């Protein structure tokens, strides 16, 4: 009998899947997320490093219309497999609860995170790596320190200037969607000069690299029924989530570090003006969003309501969920189950720095740009009673 080391087995398996995916690209289709003006629409974005979420955790997660599973899913578990296996397995459990949830597979456009199967393939493609324009050494960069351990010398960078690398990256996304339980991909670091790559590239190398990133994003956006720079379509067959409203190649973004201030309201308004799907994630710098949760983020939600549009979703929390109490704390019935309604128009900013906006079901919002404080006068009580989550 032929035996194969577990690590090698998973590499071969994912290379085989990628090969199959390359012949099935026409079948790579997901769904658009649920949308309603009736209430605030939330999203969930995190992972469980120790393994699959419990049924009790899934009871909460399955309330969200959009769920992204981060790269670290299952990383510290004893189960074999790569990030692709762990993320897809977790999203399958989410889909089993509610097939109308739009499920999103985390990817990084720049960093070759070493625990993905396709990282092994890229390691064997030195001719296609991104090289420092001055030293001519392979460019290796560190990632989010929240995810540990990491290689001491950093990780290779995907060189999107090369068509074969773009195909490799896209096929991983398509392959995930072809699993039948994934509806799109989160393209972290897909915006220009992310991870400060511009510090290592001359003008021509930088231009080729950034143009390649745009091509990658644009190809996937079109694959999922959208058009780069145009409104996110109601009949979309998936989503590719970028990072910035002025980013090329996308029709959906996540504002990762949203804070209750006028600067971030303007960023949201810019994305909404494009008609983009927008995930608004409260900045982790706003520490009370993690330590306190629902009762402490009224200002951030008010700022969101001032700027939001169709396909705008609100969420918060760390990229790694430490326990069940944390998962429970992300669902805010006092915010997510109260009546909202369609906006009665765009928000109005008065000369004294006060923003106001009203919604058709009777909810009214005020945000003071001088103090960064907001108030929400809800039209009615929450449809669901909040439970206290304790750490």
Image (spheres, helix red, strand yellow):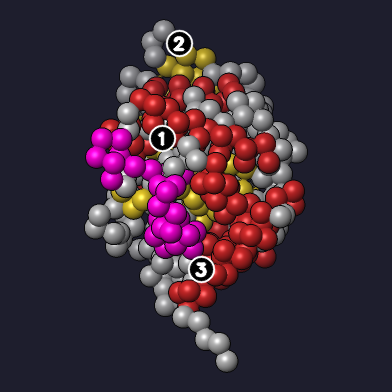
Q: Secondary structure at mark 3?
A: helix
Residue 159 found in image quarter:
top left
- Whether residue 99 sits left or right of residue 321 in the image: it is right
Taking 213 as reference, is 261 above or below it? above
The reply to whether the magenta stretch includes residue 116 is yes
- Quarter in which the C terminus is drawn: bottom left
Residue at 48% x, 74% y is 8
- Whether residue 37 sits left or right of residue 85 in the image: it is right
* Mark sitting on residue 350: 2
Residue at 44% x, 62% y is 120
- Earlier in the chain: of badge 1 and badge 2, it is 1
Residue at 48% x, 67% y is 82
Question: What residue is pinned by disc 3?
Answer: 11
Q: Position of residue 259 (x, y in %)?
A: 38, 33
Q: Looking at this rendering, what residue extends furthest in the top direction? A: 351
Q: CA distance from mark 1 to mark 3?
A: 37 Å
Tag 1: Cα neighbours inside 10 Å, few (<14), some, or many (≥20)?
A: many
Question: What residue is pinned by disc 1?
Answer: 258
Q: Secondary structure at mark 2?
A: loop
Q: Nearer the viewer, mark 1 or mark 3?
A: 3
Q: Position of residue 336 (x, y in %)?
A: 56, 45
Q: CA distance from mark 2 to mark 3?
A: 58 Å
Q: Which residues are magenta?
A: 109-137
Q: Looking at the image, can residue 100 be seen? A: no
Report the number of discs. 3
Mark 1 and mark 2 in contact? Answer it, CB < 8 Å.
no
- Earlier in the chain: of badge 2 and badge 3, it is 3
- Quarter in which the N terminus is drawn: bottom right
Taking 75 as reference, is 63 above or below it? above
Residue at 32% x, 28% y is 202
Q: Looking at the image, can residue 207 be seen? A: yes
Q: Nearer the viewer, mark 2 or mark 3?
A: 3
């Amino acid at each position: 009998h032929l035996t194969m080391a577990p690590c090698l087995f998973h590499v071969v398996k994912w290379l085989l899947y990628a090969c199959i995916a390359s012949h099935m690209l026409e079948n790579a289709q997901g769904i658009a997320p649920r949308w309603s003006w009736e209430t605030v629409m939330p999203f969930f974005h995190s992972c469980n490093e120790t393994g699959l979420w419990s049924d009790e955790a899934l009871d909460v997660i399955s309330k969200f219309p959009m769920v992204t599973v981060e790269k670290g899913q299952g990383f510290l578990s004893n189960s074999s497999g790569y990030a692709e296996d762990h993320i897809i397995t977790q999203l399958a459990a989410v889909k089993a609860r509610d097939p109308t949830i739009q499920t999103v597979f985390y990817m990084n456009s720049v960093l070759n995170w070493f625990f993905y199967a396709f990282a092994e393939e890229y390691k064997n493609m030195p001719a296609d790596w991104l090289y420092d324009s001055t030293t001519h050494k392979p460019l290796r960069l560190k990632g989010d320190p929240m995810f540990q351990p990491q290689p001491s010398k950093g990780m290779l960078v995907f060189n999107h200037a090369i068509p074969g690398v773009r195909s490799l990256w896209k096929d991983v996304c398509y392959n995930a969607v072809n699993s039948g339980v994934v509806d799109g991909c989160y393209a972290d670091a897909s915006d220009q000069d992310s991870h400060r790559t511009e510090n290592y590239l001359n003008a021509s190398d930088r231009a080729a690299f950034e143009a390649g990133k745009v091509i990658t994003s644009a190809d996937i956006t079109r694959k999922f029924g959208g058009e780069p720079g145009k409104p996110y379509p109601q009949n979309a067959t998936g989503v590719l989530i970028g990072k910035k409203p002025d980013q090329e190649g996308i029709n959906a973004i996540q504002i990762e570090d949203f804070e209750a201030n006028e600067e971030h309201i303007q960023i949201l308004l810019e994305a909404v003006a494009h008609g983009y799907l927008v995930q608004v994630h409260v900045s982790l710098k706003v520490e009370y969003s993690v330590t306190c949760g629902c009762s402490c983020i009224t200002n951030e939600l008010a700022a969101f309501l001032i700027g939001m549009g169709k396909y705008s979703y609100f969420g918060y929390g760390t990229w790694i969920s430490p326990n069940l109490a944390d998962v429970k704390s992300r669902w805010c019935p006092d915010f997510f189950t109260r009546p909202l309604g369609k906006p009665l128009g765009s928000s109005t900013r008065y000369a004294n720095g006060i923003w106001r906006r009203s919604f058709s079901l009777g909810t009214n919002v005020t945000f003071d740009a001088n103090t960064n404080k907001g108030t929400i006068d809800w039209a009615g009580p929450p449809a669901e009673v909040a439970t206290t989550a304790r750490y």
